[in-house]
Image: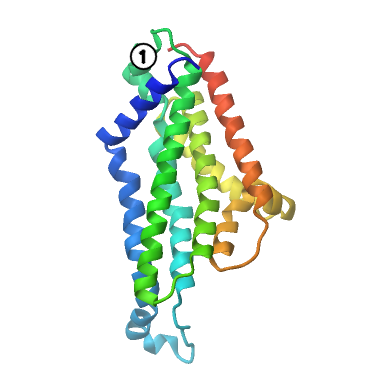
Amino acid sequence: MRGFAAFARKEVLEIVRTWRLWVLPGIVLFFALTGPLMARFTPEILRAVASDQLGQFTLPDPTYADAYTGWIKNLSQIVLFALIIVYGGIVSSERRSGTAVLVLTKPVSRGAFILAKATVHSAFLAVLVVAGTLVTWGGTAIVFGEAPGGALWSASLAWLVFGILFVALMTLLSVVISPTAGAAGAGLGAYALVSIAALWTPLGTYSPAALTGVPTSLALGKSVETFWPVCTALLLAATLVALAVAAFRRQEL
């Protein structure tokens, strides 16, 4: 893995200097800031706007759990979709631009090139999720007057494992599928398949597919199985990165 540190520094600089710095953080920060407010005032807005249509139906009073589940829902949908699209060209874009050829003509490892990408961008995602969770936690405490930390943090960290799995998947897809749109489409298709797989109880309990629903349950304070979904997701992520390394080594630049 010669050159890992140099490649890692390169990835950090690219994150800071390019549009990637603004897309995912901007989306995460927006939902972290607005989520508690939306959870608090949406029922009141609905009552004011659609009181006649509601009839005898009474909307429940919002609680901090609504803010928590809203945060996880946004992570699981919009943020994950943005991640898939942004990382559709994480490797292929550098091959097309010639950057990969330039850096890999030096005596450095192709494996380090791929591993640095997967590692740095997983760490980047972790920073975003932690920062967004802190903002959501503080905003929920201000808006609702209470914000137990355990449910929110356990839910966010469970989703983070799922997000890291998709960083690994997109790294592999970007190696084997050159068009960015093609890799992103395959990533979205993979998410759909995982969501369907979660409907089968064994997969929905012990496999990474369980992480499509586990974070929401944790946000609601429910006791659910997390050990096996987290372990299998991390194992699968490592396997996907290893496959990406193997595939990249066999490709012509």
Q: Write the residue at 53% across / 35% down.
A: 169
Q: Write the residue at 43% across / 29% down.
A: 117
Quarter of the image where one finds residue 213: bottom right
Q: How is the image coloured?
A: rainbow
The residue at the far right in this view is: 202
Residue kind at label 1, given as amino acid type: Val
Q: Write the residue at 44% across / 78% down.
A: 62
Looking at the rendered image, the quarter that the C terminus falls into is: top left
Provide residue 208's location: percent of width, then percent of height: 63, 46
Q: Write the residue at 49% across / 88% down.
A: 57
Res 38 seen here: no
* Mark 1 closeness class: few <14, some 14–19, many ≥20 residues within 10 Å: some
Relative to the observer, which residue lies in front, 2 or 111?
2
Provide residue 234's location: percent of width, then percent of height: 60, 40
Q: Vertical placement of 153 versus 48: above or below? A: above
The secondary structure type at the circle numbered 1 is: helix
Q: Vertical placement of 111 versus 43: above or below? A: above
Residue for badge 1: 103
Res 159 seen here: yes
Relative to the observer, which residue lies in front, 22 or 55?
22
Q: Vertical placement of 152 versus 25: above or below? A: below
Quarter of the image where one finds residue 53: bottom left
Provide residue 105's location: percent of width, then percent of height: 39, 8
Provide residue 195's location: percent of width, then percent of height: 59, 51
